[in-house]
Image: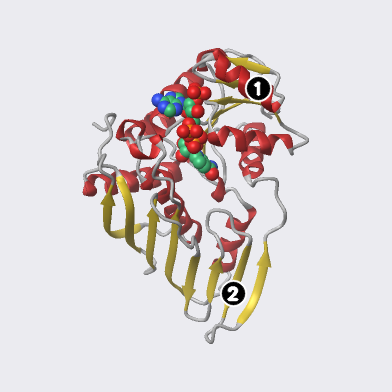
Amino acid sequence: MGKEIRHIGIIGAGHIAEKMVSTLDGMADMDCLAVASRTLEKARAFVQRRGIPRAYGSYEALLDDPDIDLVYVATPHSHHYDVTRRALLKGKPCLVEKAFMANAAQAQDILDLARERQVFVSEAIWTRYLPVAQMIRRLVAEGAIGQMRMITATLAYEISAKERILRPELCGGALLDLGVYVLHFVRTCSSSPVVRMESLCTKFETGVDLSESVSLVLEDGTLASVQASAGCQGDNVGVIAGTKANLWVDDINNPKVVRIYGRHHDLLAEYPVPPQITGFEYELHACRDAIRAGRIETEQVPHEEILYITRLTDELRRRWGVRFPMDA
Ligand SMILES: NC(=O)c1ccc[n+]([C@@H]2O[C@H](COP(=O)([O-])OP(=O)(O)OC[C@H]3O[C@@H](n4cnc5c(N)ncnc54)[C@H](OP(=O)(O)O)[C@@H]3O)[C@@H](O)[C@H]2O)c1
């Protein structure tokens, strides 16, 4: 039996840190104990505004706080590796925002370190922890749509003014920010390996990807066709088409309803998603359950799965010529 996980420490007082605090505010069994920022002024302003007990003016100081049970890494992708590595070396379990690392070499290094030190680490790809992800997988596996043939999904938001999206040194681009969700949607539907991949992308002037379209052939014969963009508002719908019916997801980035439509677009079944705080509570509980059980990875997103997706994104970036300073 592992340690109890209650107090979360947040690294990086930015946009997603705010949402994590709102999640923890709604949870009875976990709380945000501290926030660390690169400057003490920013950390203090954040904790005062959100009613959090402790502020740290360096990431290292939070990692040294013995009362922090789980570190949530909420910096740009470029800064995940260094802080996660230092946390694991200090024995601190970590939940690292997506995309887990800049590239597969970094991901492999961190996962090796976690195994060597027997310290928990996972990726905060929150959609994989939602109960609806398990439900979609089960419906497909139980034959609700017949034999699965095609998967289509889009995730696109107009976020092109954000520094961390634009700049290669912050590991910008649509793929690591939004493309990972559509790839994970495919993997939610099927764990069958990718046997062929074709893709296209357009780029920002900075050289990172703006919009992309990726087609994947899976070993089980399914064709997946997914799109992501950091420059427009998409419908963000996902459809899994089978020989008897299709499964329609209203928003792959936080499904509110899943529907099964028959051959004549007749509604066969509807599955509303139960109310949630923000949805992040499920990833937090998955981390807690894994650590309690003495595991270093979650059941929902095992380390092999994190690596699999990172290798796909590495390969796509290689084909597009989207390079980050930390790529070998
Ligand atoms: N799960 C989701 O739904 C979701 C949604 C959006 C983003 N994300 C992920 O969350 C992470 C952070 O995204 P965000 O939107 O919160 O980013 P953000 O607001 O731009 O930045 C987060 C924080 O990172 C810190 N930081 C450290 N080094 C930095 C640097 N060189 N330049 C800029 N900031 C730096 C800053 O905190 P301090 O100044 O306090 O140190 C900043 O406030 C990313 O991995 C992103 O993909 C997840």
Q: Please report whichever mark, 1 or 2, sits nearer to the chain's N-terminal start.
A: 1
**Residue 77 vertical placement versus 132 (above, below):** above
The 10 Å Cα crowd at callout 2, few under 14, some 14 to 19, many 20 or more, is many
Q: Position of residue 244 (x, y in %)?
A: 52, 81
The residue that appears at 37% across and 64% down in the rendered structure is 225
Q: Element under label 2?
A: strand
* Labelled disc at residue 47: 1
Residue 46 or 17: which is nearer the viewer? 46
- Total labels: the figure holds 2
Report if residue 169 is visible in the image: yes
**Residue 205 vertical placement versus 48 (above, below):** below
* Labelled disc at residue 58: none
The 10 Å Cα crowd at callout 1, few under 14, some 14 to 19, many 20 or more, is many
* Left or right of 83 on screen, residue 175: left
Depth-wise, is mark 1 or mark 2 nearer the camera?
Answer: 1
* Left or right of 217 on screen, residue 131: right
Residue type at numbered disc 1? Val
Q: Element under label 1?
A: helix
Quadrant position of the C terminus in the picture: top left
Residue 323 or 91: which is nearer the viewer? 323
Q: Position of residue 29 (x, y in %)?
A: 76, 34
Q: Which residue is mark 2?
A: 260
Furthest residue toward bottom: 264
Furthest residue toward front: 161
The residue that appears at 44% across and 37% down in the rendered structure is 100
Q: Position of residue 123 (x, y in %)?
A: 50, 38
Quadrant position of the N terminus in the picture: top right
CA–CA distance in space, label 1 to label 2: 45 Å
The residue that appears at 37% across and 43% down in the rendered structure is 310
